[in-house]
Image (cartoon, rainbow, N blue to C red):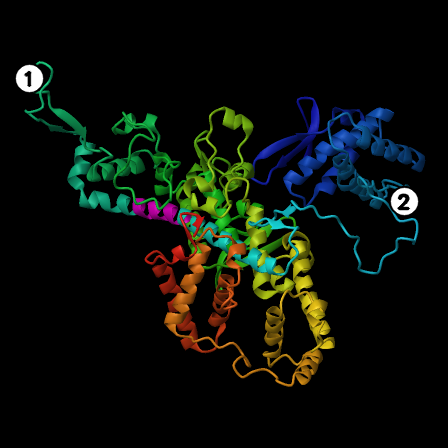
Amino acid sequence: MKYHVQNGKPGFNYTCDRGIDRFIELSTYHLQLKDRDVLSELMILYCQGKRSATYVSWIKRINSTLYAALEYISIDCLPTNATEWRELVKQAYAKTLVSPNDKALSTRVAEWNKNLKPFLVFLKDRDVIPPHVIIPRMKKTGELSKKSSFKAVLIGEKKATEVKVDDNINNVLVPISLSRNDAEYLDEIQFDLKRSRTVLHDCLLKYWQAIKLHYDFAQSLMEEFPKKHPQLLARYINSDLYDFSHDRNDLGKTGKPKPPRRIHIANPTSLFGSMLFMYVVGSECNGIFRIQDLPKAKLPSSLSDRAFTVRCLPKLGFESTDNIDISHRFDWCFGYIRNADIGCLIALLMMLNPKFTYISLLQAKVKYTDNKPLLELDDLGMSFSITKARASDMKKENLDDVSLEIIEFLHEIREKHLHLIKNKKQENFLFLAYSRKSKGLVNPDSCKVDKIITGAELKRSIERGHKQIHLSSHFPSLLDVGLGPDAINHSKIRASEGVLEWFRTGSIASVSRVLGNTQKVALKHYIPEPLIAKYNTRLVRRFQNLLIVTATFKEDYCLEAVDFNSWQELHHFLLTLLEDEDNKSPIIEYLRSLSSEGVSREVKGKLDIPLSENVLTALYLYRLAALNSSVSSKSLSIVDDTTQLSPLAFITLANHLINYLPTSKESRISQIHIRATEQATKLLNKTSWGDLFVSKGKEQ
């Protein structure tokens, strides 16, 4: 940042996170201050280390609060004594609350507590404001302080909060209802979240595979076409552009044969013509497909972007091809990606590498400041590092095959089109989109990139006739699992990865390690508090029931004392505990001593599963069929009266084996698991196991 007066207006010149030079205005009252240079330097010092978007919004709020107070009390320099500072703090406090702009009271409170107060404390720490001047914290709306011990609570106890029936938490892919407090709801959430994540991952992967398939095809065509079709290329170079066909049986209105028909040799509807068409676009038009440029390149011009097909293009692989035009596919072929493509690639990278955040990926660089590449080989394979501005830290992830393929692709197309980067300050960015307005590569704006994921579109854009394109426009199957517009964003994707890791391990430490955050941040921002409360409730109720059963063992009122509905449920609960030989809890041991019959040999011991390839394939196939169905998790959790098992029990068993078997010390077991996984995936589309659950979205 650098203080500057532009066209009579004071402000700061700065370079935004996208590498573009910008100017942010200060209040014009700043020019009336004699010590404005001192205040400007303090503001620059306060903003050091912050993202440009952060200090731009901060300056806007300072204009409406601090400068409004300075103008109100009509001073031409900063206060010099404690009395004057107290007056300024008082007026700034009041101006924040009663400013004429249309803001909610809670917003005004946040402006003081999060923007102006920290800056005044900053000035106080640097002896600009005397130390005995109090800078109060503004209380939030409805906030009260205790003045009596009458309502004192136990340490750690929280005040009960009213929960409405329709309250939901929406920071993950599946809404979590606060009206459900039964322990079984945890299993339903886990299944729904896993299914939604699987469907979204498959759609994002297909999107990436379509981009890569088109790019690889075009690179091969540009290399092989001159070798395989030299005569066709020679005709184009010599301007021999048409083939003529004459049908004597095709008569006109006068009864005479029609004149010969001419067909362009680069006709995109024929196989060889479409190959020549693509080759010319790549060699003569720099790979940029625009209808108005076709005549200059001696290509057919009587075409529209959506009215024709290019026969040689590879199969798209989308569920619906109505919302993707030819020019977009040509961009893929020649290494140009659009905002929507970047949004999908970032979502997939975040899903595979949860340490990466949306903004840190969007603004990821290719090299360190010392020109050392951020994509590097270490002991665990290829890794990539990004800067997380909020944490002021570098985060490194070891890349899987898909992530490595994406980042290598981005490096390749960046080097290929380096000459198209208009702003040299953006040369180090990993993600660069082609701008048809500037006819060059730019680091895209975040609000444009996430539209494909969120489905959000400005009202004025819709009024102009812009069609709202969401990922579900290409993959309608997302709608079957509730992932339509306004249901997904990049933050939810990352938070869902953290919650699934918590479901898998039950460890907050593991979640913080996967997300690259501290345990405190993981608890506060990523794992919904009601989930942990429900999990703890399940553990507490389990212990309470065990304690009560032990105390009332063989008593007639035992069932009434616990929260089970039948003796069968109670019997199943006790067997589950007693058959675990590794559990040496004193209460369990005491309960075993009370039971004269003990545990029958049929149920005593650990769970035995026949680890044959066929059995695992069937179990994994059953799980995949359930994940691909639209049946609710609540329906899957219904227990059969005869077997006392639910479909969700088999799915949970499959999830357990998928997490456990790859870690087995016996290579034979891990190989069986790998083969069974591959076989189940292949059989999913060849069998009709999905009919076990739903058919065309309706329950059977």
- Horizontally, residue 630 falls left or right of residue 126, namely left
Image point (54%, 84%), residue name: 601
Q: Is residue 615 above or below residue 344?
A: below
Task: Residue 402: give its label.
Answer: none
Q: Nearer the viewer, mark 1 or mark 2?
A: 1
- Can residue 518 be seen in this snapshot? no
Q: Position of residue 692 (x, y in %)?
A: 41, 57
Give the x, y percent position of residue 38. Answer: 79, 35
Indicate the secondary structure of the residue bearing disc 1: loop
Of pointers 1 and 2, the one earlier in the residue sequence = 2
- Whether residue 383 appears in this view of the structure is yes
- Residue in the picture at 43% in, 66% down: 619
Residue 666 colored in magenta in the image: no
Image quarter of residue 617: bottom left
Circle 1 packing at 10 Å, graded few (<14), some (14-19), many (20+), is: few
Q: Position of residue 540 (x, y in %)?
A: 70, 66
Circle 1 residue = 256
Q: Main secondary structure of the magenta part?
A: helix
Work out which quarter of the rendered image holds the N terminus and state it. Answer: top right
How many marks are shown on the rendered structure? 2
- Up the image or down, 504 lies above or below 330; here it is below
Position of 163 relative to 287 (above/below): below
Mark 1 and mark 2: span between their CA atoms? 104 Å
Q: Amino acid at mark 2?
A: Pro
Q: Is residue 390 left or right of residue 282?
A: right
Viewer-closest of 311 and 70: 311
**Which residue bears the numbered disc 2?**
131
Q: Amino acid at mark 1?
A: Lys
Q: For numbered disc 2, what is the local secondary structure?
A: loop
| Nearer-the-camera pick, 464 or 629 | 629
Give the residue displayed 63% in from the left and 75% down from the top.
Answer: 574
Segment tinted magenta in the rendering: 208-219
